[in-house]
Image: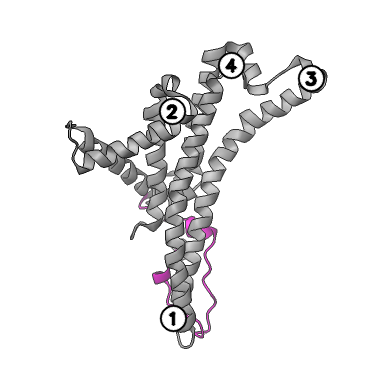
């Protein structure tokens, strides 16, 4: 019996090797979910990724609210964990990239981005959820769009129209005729390619990671029959290895996303691009 093409997980198929059925390989259909509410044809519906995004947001807000609603001079465990996370982003990323004086005002924005992206990534290895929200391009695209709007508006606010143009293009008359070609390439790269790669980098890593996890998980179940049991054990070991690796990648991708965000902001504040 084949699996529901919109919800492929290891336990959703009775197909095993030697049963005369093919391997239910994961694919694009593994990232499609039936609506929990509404009609998908009307573009007004609510599905599992949306639910996870909402729950993730509530978890983050609830965690920091519980940690800082009654701050103490001698912090408890929850406040200590929250302070360490906040301070890591503030000192390790914002201050190091933008500087303390200029960067302080952007700390709340960057901290929010980091923990939101990390939480959306973490859903991939949380039982029952088992799906990284950021593996759907719409979510990284919206986040990258927020960063893009912040970066561009800040550039115009700090430098004015002419100064922003120089910031985006790095225009230098001393280069002669080549300066115009270089300016066009820089303008295209900064205003079009940069936000695209910012979103795709996060999306592609989480999409690939989830696909690999699905592949080995489904393979473990599929091989669980006859002599295939020996191979199922190897595949299950790979599930554990990939889960541990994915846990690392999830944090790294959140870190890289906000590091690039700070780099963009620093570029907007700099006198020369």
Q: Nearer the viewer, mark 1 or mark 3?
A: 3
Q: Mark 3 points at which residue?
A: 175
Q: Is residue 147 above or below residue 122?
A: above
Q: How many labels does the image show?
A: 4
Within 10 angstroms of label 2, few (less than 14), some, or many (20 or more) residues?
some
Q: Which of marks 1 and 2 is in front?
A: 2
Gap between marks 3 and 2, in whole Å? 34 Å
Pointers 4 and 3 in contact (C-beta within 8 Å): no
Residue 79 lies in what quarter of the image? top left
Gap between marks 1 and 2, in whole Å? 52 Å
Q: Which of marks 4 and 3 is nearer the N terminus?
A: 3
Within 10 angstroms of label 1, few (less than 14), some, or many (20 or more) residues?
some
Q: What stretch is highlighted in magenta?
A: 8-37
Q: Name the residue under label 4.
A: 271
Q: Tell me where residue 128 appears, x and y as whole percent.
A: 33, 60
Could you tell me which secondary element the residue under label 2 belongs to? helix
Q: Which of marks 4 and 2 is in front?
A: 2
Gap between marks 4 and 2, in whole Å? 18 Å
Q: Name the residue under label 1.
A: 224
Q: Earlier in the sequence, mark 3 or mark 2?
A: 2
Which residue is located at x 51 percent, y 53 percent? 207
Q: Tell me where residue 125 appears, x and y as whole percent.
A: 38, 57
Q: Is residue 132 above or below residue 117?
A: below
Can you tell which mark lies on residue 95? Answer: 2
């Amino acid at each position: 019996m084949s699996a529901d093409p919109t919800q492929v997980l290891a336990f959703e198929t009775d197909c095993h090797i030697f049963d005369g059925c093919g391997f239910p390989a994961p694919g694009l259909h593994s990232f499609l979910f039936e609506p929990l509410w509404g009609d998908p044809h009307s573009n007004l519906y609510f599905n599992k990724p949306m639910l996870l995004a909402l729950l993730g947001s509530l978890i983050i807000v609830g965690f920091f609210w519980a940690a800082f609603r009654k701050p103490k001079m001698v912090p408890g465990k929850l406040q200590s964990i929250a302070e360490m996370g906040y301070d890591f982003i503030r000192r390790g990323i914002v201050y190091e990239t933008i500087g303390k004086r200029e960067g302080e005002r952007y700390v709340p924005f960057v901290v929010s981005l980091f923990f939101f992206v990390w939480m959306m990534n973490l859903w991939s290895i949380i039982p029952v959820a088992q799906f990284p929200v950021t593996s759907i391009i719409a979510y990284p695209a919206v986040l990258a769009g927020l960063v893009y709007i912040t970066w561009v508006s800040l550039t115009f606010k700090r430098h004015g129209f002419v100064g922003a143009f120089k910031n985006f293009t790095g225009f230098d008359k001393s280069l002669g005729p080549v300066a115009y070609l270089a300016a066009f390439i820089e303008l295209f790269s900064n205003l079009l390619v940069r936000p695209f790669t910012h979103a795709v980098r996060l999306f592609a890593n989480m999409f690939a990671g989830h696909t690999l996890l699905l592949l080995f998980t489904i393979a473990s179940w599929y091989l669980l029959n006859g002599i295939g049991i020996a191979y199922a054990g190897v595949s299950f070991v790979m599930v554990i290895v990939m889960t541990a690796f994915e846990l690392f990648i999830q944090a790294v991708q959140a870190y890289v996303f906000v590091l690039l965000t700070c780099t963009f902001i620093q570029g907007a504040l700099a006198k020369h691009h």
